[in-house]
Amino acid sequence: MRVYNFSPGPAVLPEEVLRRAQEEMLDWHGTGMSVMEMSHRGPEFGEILTRAEADLREILAVPSNYRILFMQGGALAENAIVPLNLLGEQGLADYVDTGIWSQKSITEASRYGEVVVVASGKSSGYTRIPPESEWRRSPDAAYLHLCTNETIGGLEYHWLPEPAYGVPLVADMSSNLLSRPVPVERFGLIYGGAQKNIGPSGLTLVIVREDLLGRAHPLCPSAFNYQVVADHASLFNTPPTFAIYIAGLVFAWLKEQALPGLSALASMEARNIEKSALLYEALDESGFYRTAVEKSDRSRMNVTFFLPKEEHNAVFLAGAKERGLVQLKGHKSAGGMRASIYNAMPKSGVVALVEYLAEFERVHG
Ligand SMILES: *Cc1c(COP(=O)(O)O)cnc(C)c1O
């Protein structure tokens, strides 16, 4: 039996995608082999890679002067790969600190150059995203980095900074990429691990504007040099073939989810607004549960909340599990609960959670 899996990542995937992969597991399209067993340089995998890239380009409306790279190492590797590729002669980059994931980006980038923290949510206990009016940006930064969705704290940008000084915007979108339309042309580079909202772990997506290629530090490993990876169409070395295949099935699934008259991502956004509003409304109306994040900065992907007493947590989680609602425990650094409700979480899962919240409150409130 499938459960409702609220894991922050690796996370729930569309059941249709898993079934399709199951059907094709032993024999992909009459080749007599699994995608896992294919040469990454053969025509069959070539078809899978080309289709995945074309679908992603279409769904996200990636302009033609951007390259899509299928890489490895996850977002944490990108925290080093980005400065290695982009710091250039400036040697200085701006970072916005909105929580644990942006802090990790800051710490790693500091090993490669000068990092200026232009704003921090620290004074608010990371319950709000510092408004742009509080940012102190450097005119000579090689780039400005932000994390568009703080997966642990449960904060999400619902706005984008103004372009300034011609400084490219770089974003860690690991946990909200493909959950909503994104104006890619406003960014210099977007990266994210696939395992939150896109596919299996092992695949990292990078979308980079062409003029930012070719600036890598001489000591940057070739496999992590964006120019090299782009020149080889993501086949400089063996890419994570099976993860790319599954991500490709997810892209195709996303296209099928488009509502009449809406793009795939506008449709996902509408669903994600609906699902997250259901959950936040239930939490706001209860008087039992508590949320910490400023309403305007609440994540649609990761809904964090607290029970009145810490000793409720274990009972809450056990009761949830009995109902097939799993992986609701908050990150150890944050405590409380976190419901990750990515694209593949059906509305019925959120409804089941909301019903459980009410029931738990009736008994323990
Ligand atoms: C999960 C996550 C990461 C870590 O990604 P890895 O793929 O484990 O390296 C980094 N940033 C954000 C926003 C995340 O959600």
Image (spheres, rainbow, N blue to C red):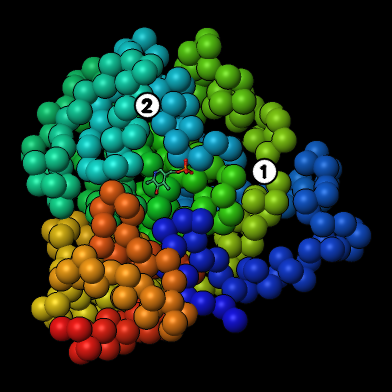
- The reply to whether residue 110 is visible in this rendering is yes
Q: Give the residue drawn at x 23%, y 69%.
A: 311
The three-letter amino acid code for the residue at tag 2 is Glu
Q: Quadrant of residue 327?
A: bottom left
Figure check: 82 above or below 73:
above
Q: Where is residue 157 drawn, in percent x and y?
A: 25, 51
Foreground pick, 230 / 290:
290
Question: In screen coordinates, is 362 left or right of 80?
Answer: left
Ligand 1 located in image quadrant: top left
Q: Estimate how packed mark 2 is, as few (under 14), some (14 to 19) or many (20 or more) residues with alpha carbons within 10 Å.
A: some
Q: Give the residue drawn at x 61%, y 20%.
A: 222
> Is label 2 in a helix, a strand or a loop?
helix
Figure check: 207 above or below 211:
below
Q: Which residue is mark 1?
A: 240
Q: Are marks 1 and 2 in contact (CB under 8 Å)?
A: no
Question: In screen coordinates, is 138 left or right of 357?
Answer: left
Q: Give the residue drawn at x 36%, y 49%.
A: 183
Q: Which residue is mark 2?
A: 108
Nearer mark to the viewer, of 1 and 2: 2
Q: CA distance from mark 1 to mark 2?
A: 24 Å
| Chain-order first, disc 1 or disc 2 | 2
Q: Estimate how packed mark 1 is, as few (under 14), some (14 to 19) or many (20 or more) residues with alpha carbons within 10 Å.
A: some
Query: Does the numbered disc 1 mark a residue whose Cβ is under 8 Å from ligand 1?
Result: no
- The reply to whether residue 270 is visible in this rendering is no
Q: How many marks?
A: 2
